[in-house]
Amino acid sequence: MQTVLSVQNLQKSYGKKVALRGVTFAVQKGTCFGLLGPNGAGKSTTMKILTGIVGADGGTAHILGLNANHEQNAIRRQVGYVPQNITLYEKLSARDNLVFFGEMYGVHGQVLEQRIREVLDQTGLTSRAQDAIESFSGGMKRRINIAAALLHRPKLLILDEPTVGIDPQSRNHIFEMIRTLKAKGVTIIYSTHYMEEVEALCDDVAIIDQGNVVVQGTLKSLLSRFASKAVYVEAEAFEQLSLLPGDVQCERRDSGWVIETDDVMDTMKHILQQASKQRIELQALEMVRPSLESVFLTLTGTSLRD
Ligand SMILES: Nc1ncnc2c1ncn2[C@@H]1O[C@H](COP(=O)(O)OP(=O)(O)OP(=O)(O)O)[C@@H](O)[C@H]1O
């Protein structure tokens, strides 16, 4: 494993507002790394420090062996950054925007022409190349914004909440673009407050909350260490069903109940046995998939959706 990005104890305040309290994490080559946290957690600030848009008050960040504090020109040649807000010229066509951004990234002439064709193909927007950006949907603009960050073939792509407020078709397209880039060896940093996106895309995750990284690890390890285990059951006479000896934590969800348990298989077996003994019909009995939502709740005591 090769570390392409390492962040040590990053600190940042805006006036009296502390945004980062000592953020530390590392990203391995060729992985998709999710930076997951609620609004205001410090995700954008971290990314802005990595890309030299704001300076850190303390701590260090190294990208591809370069220091983010004073080697930004060299970093920019190898990193693509897609900011949270769309940065395109509305009156210009998609193609002209790409020419502008390509040249800014130091790509010119025939190479740029070729790259524009390729990234338009990747976005699925080749047929709209000559249209002004102002005629695009939010999702299409976002896809072109990502394309603009790919023209110089970055080794590392940093995306800040790329799916906020876009349609499902564009979201799927962005997911496919990310998967294809990853398959080609590009390292991805993906910031979001949608845990489902991290679950769908990322290998490693850092959960960030109130300016701190609460935990970092592989998605699998976080789910198995911190997600609560539970069973979902739907039965008309649920209250009459003698579930387990001792206390069980039950809470209502949809038309049924969620039962937290350390032993999912044993709990399911017990419910089946009891239902059959008491002649109670079950409408549903299934394992609750461990989720990052419950990891977040376990580690911070609050819901990610708050
Ligand atoms: N320019 C600024 N001036 C003052 N406070 C700021 C500024 N930028 C960010 N903050 C504050 O710093 C904290 C971290 O913000 P940041 O944008 O990094 O979080 P985030 O996780 O990206 O959230 P969001 O998804 O809402 O952008 C928040 O409390 C925010 O209000």
Image (cartoon, rainbow, N blue to C red):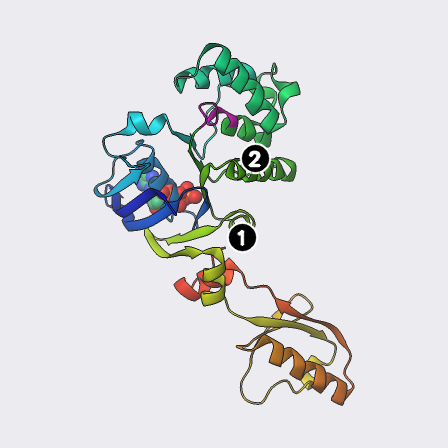
Residue 219, image x, y percentages: 48, 56
Q: Nearer the viewer, residue 89 or 289?
A: 289
Q: Which residue is mark 2?
A: 177
The residue carrying mark 1 has its beta carbon less than 8 Å from ligand 1: no
Q: CA distance from mark 1 to mark 2?
A: 16 Å
- Picture residue at 34% right of the left edge, 33% below the top: 51
Q: Which mark is residue 18?
A: none
Q: Nearer the viewer, residue 89 or 22?
A: 22
Q: Is residue 150 covered in magenta? A: yes
Q: Which residue is mark 1?
A: 199
Give the answer, above or below, for where 160 lies relative to 261: above
Tell me the chief SS of the magenta region: loop
- Picture residue at 57% right of the left edge, 30% below the top: 138
- The answer to whether mark 1 and mark 2 are in CB contact below 8 A is no
Q: Earlier in the sequence, mark 1 or mark 2?
A: 2
Q: Which residues are magenta?
A: 147-153
Residue 150, image x, y percentages: 48, 27
Q: Nearer the viewer, residue 65 or 39?
A: 65
Give the answer, above or below, for where 187 lies relative to 273: above
Tell me if residue 239 can be seen: yes
Q: Say which amino acid is labelled 1.
A: Glu
Q: Say which amino acid is labelled 2.
A: Met
The quarter holding residue 177 reads top right
Left or right position of 93 against 233 = left
Determine the quadrant in which ligand 1 lies. top left
The quarter holding residue 103 reads top left
Tell me if residue 93 can be seen: no
Residue 2, image x, y percentages: 37, 44
Residue 157, image x, y percentages: 44, 35
